[in-house]
Image (spheres, rainbow, N blue to C red):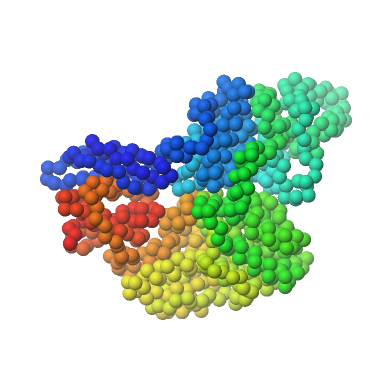
Amino acid sequence: MGAAATQYPYGITSHSCVKFGHKSEISSSNFPYEVELSRFNLYPSSDSTNNSKVCGSRIRALPDIDDIFSDIIATPLLDVVENPINLKNLTIKELKLLASEIRSELSSIMSKTKNDFKASLAVVELTVAIHHVFHAPVDKILWDVGEQTYAHKILTGRRSLMHTLRQKDGLSGFTSRSESEYDPFGAGHGCNSISAGLGMAIARDIKGKRERIVTVICNGTTMAGQVYEAMGNAGYLDSNMIVILNDSRHSLHPKIEEGSKTSITALSSTLSKLQSSKSFRRLREVAKGVTKRIGMYELAAKVDEYARGMMGPLGSTLFEELGLYYIGPVDGHNIEDLVCVLQEVSSLDSMGPVLIHVITEENQCAEYKQQSEAMENQQEGSCDLDGLLYGMRTPTYSDCFVEALIMEAEKDKDVVIVHAGMEMETSFQLFQERFPDRFFDVGMAEQHAVTFSAGLSCGGLKPFCIIPSAFLQRAYDQVVHDVDRQQIPVRFVITSAGLVGSDGPAMCGAFDITFMSCLPNMIVMAPSDEDELVDMVATAVHINDRPVCFRYPRGAIVGTDHYTHSGIPIEIGKGKILVEGQDVALLGYGAMVQNCLRAQALLSKLGIEVTVADARFCKPLDMKLLRQLCENHAFLVTVEEGSIGGFGSHVSQFIALDGQLDGRTKWRPIVLPDNYIEHALPKEQLDLAGLTGHHIAATVLKLLGRTHAMLLLKLPQRKELKTEEAQDYFKYTQGNKEKYDLFVKYTINHQGSHKNEATAPMEVTLYTIPKECQTLSFLIILYMQFSTIPFIFVRGLVV
């Protein structure tokens, strides 16, 4: 029996036990990714046994606590909390101490991981109180926004993994049903928790169960219409559920924030406790019954509404009108008050929907304020956490877009911006400061943003409606009926298109090419770099007879010395050829043009002449360019960072109807796989999706029947391994095929025959096995140096 300690990134140590038919010593090695190992025969011979057994730990292991939490103060209470059950017997004093320990830990983790935890810091006491009173996972606790759930994750058994938040194979930045039983519903784009919670409440009632349903919403999500639709339906159905409004006093309008705010006083605290008490609620129900019998119900209802409006803060009667019983305001940092109100509300068997108005402050400690200020100086946008990992602030596509639009706005006073989404990227503030009267931020109200833009256009303005790709999905009905069907010239700017790194599938912009390009009147385009983005801004300004959209990815631009020039309008439906070849044509759309160029550079070293074309337009297509590519090449490969049914589908539709596929031309599409790609670094996501330059080159080689040349995509570097190292690398030669089935695994015998199981390798290093190990089954291991790291095996002797 031998034991191997495998060092993972971020100080994670995983121990593996290995049992072989022969005695062997296994040394430590660096293997950075999760592996599941199956049986294999290390010493093949006639008398060898087949009882090899390997057990490997997953990357989801407890990290080195001294390394991750070295700066955190002692957390004796938090250390004994493995799940919410451990909170039930804690006193109010102990709950306060626990909240303090959680806040300190979140602040410390934030300083190391560069994730912004301010929303979760604001709800620490609220989270502790909820888990103290309610019995999750039997009671269902739903959250509208993932950024508020980090304290919830700590209390529900995920504390040791918080350092992996938003990283590959780590915790999601949102609640996830597949991650924990304490997450009954996924929080992604906000505003869904009341609807989902109401559905769970009705299902509970029908099935005769008794669990409590608690939903937590915030200021940002109250901008979305679905919240009020759900509240109205909850009031009508009158099913028991608790809605907690976490009011962090944010507003889209600075003037409102600077004005009067809801205050927490001794009187308001006492009134909130009175409103939530059993005796008050029962007295109120008795009074309703009496007034109904004597015919004074309407008058009594008006008196009740007036009195409660006088007691509550401004706007509290809105919730009453929707049918929710309003309680508040409650101090969100006073655990004693929170526990008192939640216990009273949870103890009522028949109460209908209740809304508890909780006031919180995000900046609760000096330590956090300092960290927050430091992060704001680095942060690129609302959700771009991947750039923060490298501590760099390079120019982004949004920067270039705003600079280009400012140039156009200076020339044309009709240019205006309508922005929608969870939060606004800092890049857009430049336009807002320059033209405050021509910038409209509507928050999480994408449906309104689209129709509002249509109205602006009908009034003679030129609106640029800026919405992240994932958020545009819920405004699709307005795009179809209020814009495209009426041919109203709204200019849609689709940000965060394609893969979005640490935000994972919740914010991934995979579908906009497909759902925008199927609209009859829509012009659909995408720039390959920042220069084309500037030109497309100018193009959109001059389109006045129909709607147009263009997408660009999150993150840094292509060039390093970019200077924003004055945009030159592009001829509608006109692509261009960047590199001319004769063997294969690569037709890229949007940001994937750059990866097509990388593939062309790799293939040119193998003597393969490749044409690279930039489509620029998905609709209308450049028919002349497509015919030219098909007539001059035997193979056409389309590449896009979008789902099935997008650019490639439009190309195939045209060339099929045009008869181009009837002859010698073969077409292959490269698109995002038909599954959701989890959070990881952008490079890692592209690897998983098979969209890197190496994957594109591999597709070309396979089309040409030159699969053996895949090993030559990068000349290998030779490295001599020690005997122990060879055995240790050997132990990991069978990776998790289910996870890495998009990648290559070769077995090549000494005669040079090969068997292709997938696609091509990334960069490789050739490891020469020493003579002591030449009895091993495989004598060369080509170790792939990029993120996904499957292996290539070569059988035979090395000369």
Residue 647 at x, y percent in the picture: 51, 66
Q: Is residue 233 above or below residue 696?
A: above
Which residue is painted at 60% across and 31% down in the image? 100
x%, y% of residue 576? 51, 76
Which x, y percent locates residue 39?
A: 26, 43
Work out which quarter of the rendered image holds the C terminus and state it: bottom left
Quadrant the N terminus occupies: top left
Q: How many marks?
A: 0
Residue at the image point whose x is 34% and y is 56% from the top: 784
- Taking depth in this image into account, of 699 and 720 the one nearest to the observer is 720
Depth check: 74 or 227 in front? Answer: 74
In the picture, residue 46 is in which quadrant?
A: top left
Name the residue at 53% across, 30% down: 75
581 shown above or below 347: below
Q: Residue at x 49, y 33 (%)?
A: 157
Asked whether residue 747 is in view, the answer is no
Q: Quadrant of residue 424?
A: bottom right
Q: Position of residue 791 (x, y in %)?
A: 31, 53
Asked whether 214 or 11 is in front, the reply is 11
- Whether residue 695 appears in this view of the structure is yes
Q: Given the current orientation, which residue lies at the most extreme left position?
A: 46
Instruction: State the residue in front, 626 or 616.
Output: 616
Q: Quadrant of residue 670?
A: bottom left
Q: In screen coordinates, is 763 left or right of 680? A: left
